[in-house]
Image (tube, grey):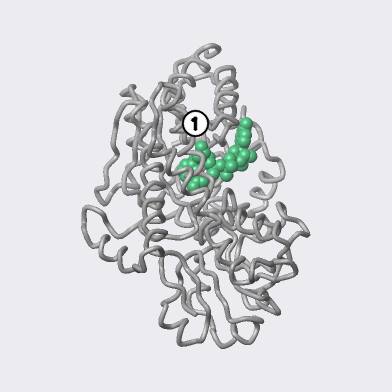
């Protein structure tokens, strides 16, 4: 099939590449000339595990092409995916300007039947809006389908190739049939393609992300309470998670969720509720709690240094909003670093993939280290913000030699309390007793 993908970010590039992998002819369109040039030269512009192999293979096979011309993209594809940004607007709602502006152009440019597939995360009613905007100018038939994306950064290729489910919101049989044909190679193991109306599909995505953000936040509250009463959140987590109604996943406490999706999607659903006179009280709490959680270790660090961080050097491991990505959008590390800098601390930071993005934002306000151990040289303490696997079993004796004080503040609960105690560290984590 002939496919076009408009917007080649984390979602669009993975979508385009994986659809090429099943034999489709794909053109990816992006307004970012530099990015398109890079991709044409065979460079993957983001860090996403396993993407490079598929990317290279499909470019070589001539099934994956890149352009800055929307016209070229629209001429090519029978199915046009919109994988455009829907960032947070000033009032917390999703900014639909990217989606609607491109839709306007689609209306002016399409010459024969197309299925326009919205993969961006958008509020209920957007498919209808997109339909109206295209219909203003379109002189041919078209359908608009809502097809929210559930891939996780860091596992995006796997998630796309083997999805647990595919949600398609469509009221056109013709479009539904095309979507089923396109996706059939990805659900051979029997996972469902769930067909529903467009509005329900749009809400499914917001409901899923808001539920997951709530699950994390609930555990963070339990963790904070554990500290007050001397319980161990790791024990509580395992005890709870073995109940199949609860499940083991997404119960890990820490310094809050970040990323390009949860924060903005929870806010967008809360705002969409407000617009319909519905007060999503649970989401208001989630937003508030998560915002405080991001800096929950800051007073503990200050306390350790007798409330004087001036001139103290803190080493930081992990800057991306989660492991296996270079994405730093809304990362808790940012809140921690801003807080520490404000208190006069110096920061020596390391992340396996996110350093260039952090450097673009912080410039020379930070010292960038070449390795996790280099970040520790002459530092007064170590702070862990992201649970990259390379941080999980460090050489503790090396750590102790490099750090001025044997103290670790761990926002992701990476280490066993007995182990760090035996190694002679002061160890402060989330929802567990402090080892000292
Ligand atoms: P992104 O910011 O990584 O990428 C968006 C791309 O669109 C950029 O390359 C940008 O240059 C391009 N673009 C902007 N305007 C354009 C235009 N007029 N024409 C062509 N290209 C244009 O965004 P993303 O993370 O891929 O997210 C896209 C959508 O998917 C959002 O709605 C997001 O909420 C949703 N989503 C994201 C994820 C994720 O993990 N990142 C997962 C599921 C859903």
Residue 130, percent from left and from top: 49, 21
Relative to 316, say whether 165 is above or below: above
The residue at 26%/52% (across/down) is 189
Image quadrant where residue 417 sits: bottom left
| Residue position marked by numbered label 1 in the rendering | 80
Q: Secondary structure at mark 1?
A: strand
Residue 292, percent from left and from top: 52, 51
Q: Does any portion of residue 12 appear in the rendered image?
A: no
Which of these two is toward me, 65 or 355? 355
Residue 171, percent from left and from top: 33, 22
Q: Does any portion of residue 287 appear in the rendered image?
A: yes
Relative to 170, say whether 413 is above or below: below
**Residue 188 appears left or right of 97:** left
Relative to 234, say whether 54 is above or below: above
Quarter containing the N terminus: top left
Furthest toward the left, the residue is: 244
The residue at 50%/80% (across/down) is 436
**Residue 74 appears left or right of 367:** left
């Amino acid at each position: 099939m002939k496919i076009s993908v408009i917007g080649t970010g984390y979602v669009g590039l993975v979508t385009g590449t994986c659809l090429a992998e099943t034999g489709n002819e794909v053109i990816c369109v992006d307004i970012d000339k530099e990015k398109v040039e890079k991709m044409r030269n065979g460079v993957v512009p983001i860090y996403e595990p396993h993407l490079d192999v598929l990317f290279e293979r499909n470019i070589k096979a001539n099934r994956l092409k890149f352009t800055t011309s929307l016209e070229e993209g629209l001429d090519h594809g029978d199915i046009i995916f919109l994988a455009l940004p829907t960032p947070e607007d000033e009032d917390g709602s999703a900014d639909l300007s990217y989606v609607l502006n491109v839709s306007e152009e689609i209306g002016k440019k399409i010459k024969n039947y197309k299925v326009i597939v919205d993969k961006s995360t958008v509020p209920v009613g957007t498919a209808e809006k997109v339909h109206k905007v295209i219909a203003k100018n379109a002189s041919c038939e078209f359908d608009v389908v809502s097809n929210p994306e559930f891939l996780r950064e860091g596992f995006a290729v796997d998630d796309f190739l083997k999805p647990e489910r595919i949600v398609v919101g469509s009221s056109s049989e013709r479009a539904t049939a095309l979507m089923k044909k396109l996706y059939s190679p990805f659900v051979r193991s029997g996972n469902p393609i769930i067909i529903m109306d467009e509005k329900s599909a749009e809400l499914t995505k917001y409901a899923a992300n808001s539920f997951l953000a709530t699950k994390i936040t609930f555990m963070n509250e339990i963790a904070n309470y554990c500290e007050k009463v001397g319980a161990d959140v790791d024990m509580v987590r395992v005890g709870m998670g073995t109940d199949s109604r609860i499940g083991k996943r997404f119960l890990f406490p820490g310094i809050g969720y970040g990323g390009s999706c949860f924060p903005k999607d929870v806010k967008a659903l809360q705002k969409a509720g407000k617009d319909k006179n519905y007060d999503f009280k649970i989401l208001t709490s989630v937003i508030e709690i998560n915002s405080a959680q991001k800096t929950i270790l800051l007073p503990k660090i200050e306390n350790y240094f007798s409330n004087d961080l001036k001139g103290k050097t803190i080493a930081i491991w992990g800057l991306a909003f989660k492991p296996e990505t270079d994405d730093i959008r809304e990362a808790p590390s940012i809140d921690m670093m801003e807080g520490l800098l404000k208190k006069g601390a110096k920061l020596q930071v390391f992340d396996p993939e996110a350093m260039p993005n952090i450097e673009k934002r912080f410039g020379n306000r930070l010292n960038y280290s070449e390795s996790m151990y280099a970040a520790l040289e002459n530092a007064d303490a170590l702070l862990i913000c992201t649970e990259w696997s390379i941080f999980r079993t460090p050489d503790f004796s090396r750590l102790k030699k490099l750090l001025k004080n044997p103290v670790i503040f761990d926002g992701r609960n990476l280490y066993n309390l007995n182990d760090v105690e035996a190694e002679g560290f002061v160890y402060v984590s989330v929802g567990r007793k402090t080892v000292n």
